[in-house]
Image: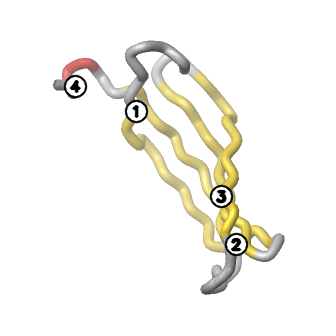
Amino acid sequence: MDSEPGLRFVTASLKVEYLLPTPLGVELEARGRVKYIGQRSVTVAIEVVAKGKVCVRGEVVAARMPDTMKK
């Protein structure tokens, strides 16, 4: 993942679960945890926390951008 030039990814899948209303005017904490790293994709679990409570939970699968899509 720390290669040069940097790897580029596109979103292959995005799942979002809204668990609680997210309050306005408070600091939000975004958390991410890598679940899987493969040759062509990465899966990351995500959370948004407000006032110590998880308001949003999700998962993103990012696919490595093929060379044909790069300039």
Q: What element carries label 1?
A: strand
- Residue carrying label 2: 55
Q: Is mark 3 on a helix, strand or loop?
A: strand
Rendered view: 44 above or below 70: below
7 relative to 44 in the view: left or right: left
Q: How far apart are marks 1 and 3 (CA)?
A: 20 Å
Quick check: marks 4 and 2 in contact, CB under 8 Å?
Answer: no
| Foreground label between 2 and 3 | 3
Q: Distance between the residues labelled 3 and 4?
A: 29 Å
49 relative to 44 in the view: left or right: right
Where residue 15 appears, x then y in whole percent?
A: 54, 56
The residue at the point 42 percent across, 22 percent down is 6
Q: Earlier in the sequence, mark 2 or mark 3?
A: 3
Q: Quadrant of the C terminus?
A: top left
> What amino acid is labelled 3 in the image?
Ala
Residue 30 circle label? 3
Rendered view: 23 above or below 65: below
Q: How far apart are marks 2 and 3 (CA)?
A: 10 Å
Q: Quadrant of the N terminus?
A: top right
- Residue carrying label 4: 70
- Residue carrying label 1: 9
Quick check: marks 3 and 4 in contact, CB under 8 Å?
Answer: no
Q: Which of marks 2 and 1 is nearer the N terminus?
A: 1
Q: How far apart are marks 2 and 1 (CA)?
A: 26 Å
